[in-house]
Image (spheres, rainbow, N blue to C red):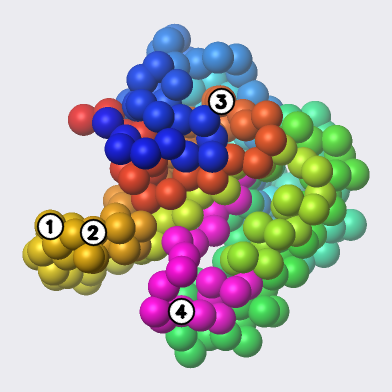
């Protein structure tokens, strides 16, 4: 159970926050309705497994890809070729999507990539927000980052700017704030788990350890699915404890 409310109005995991079992067919009772989903960054670390899962659950999916990258999308995903930094290159292809999921960002972000964050991460969410507004999309899903934090200041600043763009747009949105996502090729932070456990036990460090905790790719995918299938009426923020609560055991 979650120990505190979020600004999504969530206090307990169920029924408001339904746990998501991945790999289920469209007959699974988690479904509220079928969605038309447009995904930027659809061939990436989160994008490719997300679009495959959405198809499994009976949703209609189209993915924005760069020229020559269409072959990296799973079978059944509609292909939109465009530039994620330029709204006019894909905005007309967004309808009839009711949801946009924005997953474009700098590959393997680290403190040395501040210029890339400003050149890729910020203009891409600005383009997605503009496309969502022009297309009349009802819900936007954005992967931000946990903050405050003692490192990655440039990355956090850009993601906070992305959140501000979303709030100013008036488009209802779910913002997810993970810190580090464990998964294939992203496993070294497992070495930090004993330290996280210790910090979680200490009252003076417990809140920071929870807010900047590690999540798995499976937990992130479950949280993204939940956000898509249960659209927020306004702007909802899911932090690490909420993200962890999404995946069924």
Camera-nearest label, 2 or 4: 2
Total marks in image: 4
- Estimate the x, y position of residue 136 in percent, counting from the top left: 85, 35
**Callouts 2 and 3 close, C-beta under 8 Å:** no
Sequence-wise first label, 2 or 3: 2
**Image height of 129 relative to 28, above or below:** below
Quarter that holds the N terminus: top left
Which SS class for mark 2? helix
Which SS class for mark 3? loop
Residue placed most toward the observer, 242 or 133? 242
Q: Which residue is mark 3?
A: 230
Dot label at residue 152: 4
Sequence-wise first label, 3 or 4: 4
At label 3, counting other C-alpha atoms closer than 10 Å, the crowd grade (few under 14, some 14-19, many 20 or more) is: some
**Outermost residue toward the front?**
204
At label 4, counting other C-alpha atoms closer than 10 Å, the crowd grade (few under 14, some 14-19, many 20 or more) is: some
**Callouts 4 and 1 close, C-beta under 8 Å:** no
Tell whether position 153 is magenta.
yes
Cα distance between the residues tagged 2 and 4? 20 Å
**Image height of 231 relative to 218, above or below:** above
- Estimate the x, y position of residue 89 in percent, counting from the top left: 85, 57
Q: Residue at x 42, y 56 (%)?
A: 178
Q: Which residue is mark 2?
A: 206
- Which segment did they paint magenta? 141-158
Cα distance between the residues tagged 3 and 4? 31 Å
Q: Which residue is mark 1?
A: 201
- Estimate the x, y position of residue 209 in percent, counting from the top left: 26, 61
Camera-nearest label, 4 or 1: 1
């Amino acid at each position: 159970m979650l120990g505190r409310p979020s600004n999504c109005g969530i206090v307990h995991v169920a029924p408001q926050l339904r746990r998501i079992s991945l790999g289920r067919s469209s007959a699974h009772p988690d479904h509220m309705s079928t969605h038309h989903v447009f995904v930027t960054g659809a061939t990436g670390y989160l994008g490719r497994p997300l679009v495959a899962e959405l198809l499994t659950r009976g949703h209609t999916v189209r993915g924005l890809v760069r020229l020559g990258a269409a072959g990296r999308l799973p079978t059944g995903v509609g292909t939109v070729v465009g530039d994620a930094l330029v709204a006019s290159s894909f905005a007309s292809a967004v309808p009839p999507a009711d949801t946009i999921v924005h997953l474009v960002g700098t590959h393997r972000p680290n403190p040395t990539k501040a210029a890339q964050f400003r050149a890729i991460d910020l203009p891409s969410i600005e383009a997605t927000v503009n496309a969502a507004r022009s297309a009349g999309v009802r819900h936007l899903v954005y992967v931000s980052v946990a903050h405050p934090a003692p490192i990655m200041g440039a990355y956090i600043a850009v993601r906070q700017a992305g959140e501000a763009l979303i709030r100013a747009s008036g488009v209802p949105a779910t913002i997810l704030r993970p810190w580090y996502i464990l998964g294939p090729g992203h496993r070294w932070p497992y070495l930090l788990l004993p330290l996280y456990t210790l910090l979680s036990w200490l009252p003076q460090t417990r809140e920071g350890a929870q807010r900047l905790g590690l999540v798995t790719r499976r937990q992130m995918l479950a949280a993204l699915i939940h956000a898509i299938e249960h659209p927020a009426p306004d702007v909802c923020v899911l932090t690490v404890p909420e993200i962890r609560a999404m995946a069924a055991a």
